């Protein structure tokens, strides 16, 4: 079990590293480590679960599609967070390849599902 | 809405500062800022909700009562996290009064409640 989310960080990865921290009663909390990985240009996440992300280290850029279809880039620095309700389409436009980016992600289902 | 969890930190508080970041579909995510606050010696939290905490800055010590009644102190530094299932009795033994301590806390109900 990972004791410290900023410890034992890999410096280079072939793909994102995802580790469960807690998975209980419908909530999953994960650490995600990126070292430059991002989504393909037309690859959008469209999830059944709500997601809340917090950037713990590094830097990233999300592209988010808002109600009405408007798309906007959101830059995240350490300490920045973002709530993505279920089916709020989004993709990872960029993560820094020069440093390790550490995300905290919380997932849970919308009520009534 | 708080954009960055490490920004706009108060330096001294008469009591802990708690701010909701997300509250949706049975999950509540909060930032808690402490500047030396702690629990009274015999003051234990005994919550109906599951709680997961992550220390984002500063330093703290929790006292946790494990199954069987055994009590243990757990020191938390920045990046350390701790899962407290519902009714896992605990108290905040200490937070650093020399620097600001920032907690992330996630609360949710056990299944079937």
Image (cartoon, coloured by chain):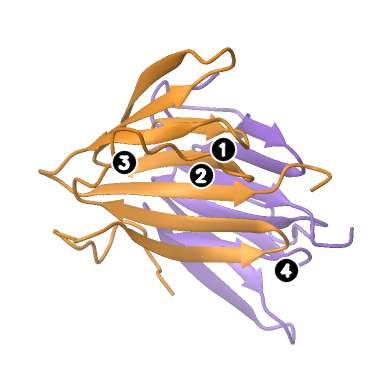
Chain colours: A orange, B purple
Measuring 39% from the left and 30% from the top, which residue is drawn there? A80
Measuring 54% from the left and 71% from the top, which residue is drawn there? B73
Q: Earlier in the sequence, mark 1 or mark 2?
A: 1
The residue pinned by badge 4 equals: B88
Q: Earlier in the sequence, mark 4 or mark 2?
A: 4
C-alpha separation, residue under disc 1 versus residue under disc 3? 33 Å
Measuring 38% from the left and 26% from the top, which residue is drawn there? A63
Measuring 45% from the left and 50% from the top, which residue is drawn there? B55
Mark 3 vs mark 4: give the one in front: 3
The residue pinned by badge 2 equals: B103
Residues flagged by tags 1 and 3 on a common chain: no
Instruction: Say the numbered circle drawn on residue B32.
Output: 1
The residue pinned by badge 3 equals: A39
Residue B81 rendering spot, x and y as whole percentages: 48, 59
Q: Quadrant of the N terminus of chain B?
A: top right
- Neighbours of disc 4 within 10 Å: few (<14), some (14-19), many (20+): some
Mark 1 vs mark 3: give the one in front: 3
- B43 horizontally vs A89: left or right: right
Closest to the observer: A25 or A64? A64
């Amino acid at each position: 079990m990972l004791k410290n989310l900023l410890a034992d960080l890999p410096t280079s990865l072939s793909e994102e590293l995802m580790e469960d921290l807690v998975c209980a009663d419908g909530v999953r909390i994960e650490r995600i480590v990126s070292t430059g990985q991002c989504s393909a240009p037309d690859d959008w996440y469209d999830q059944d679960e709500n997601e809340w992300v917090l950037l713990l280290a590094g830097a990233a850029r999300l592209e988010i599609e808002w109600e009405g279809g408007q798309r906007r880039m959101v830059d995240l620095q350490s300490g920045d967070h973002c709530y993505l309700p279920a089916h709020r389409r989004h993709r990872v436009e960029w993560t820094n390849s020069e440093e390790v980016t550490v995300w905290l992600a919380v997932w849970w289902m919308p009520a009534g599902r």
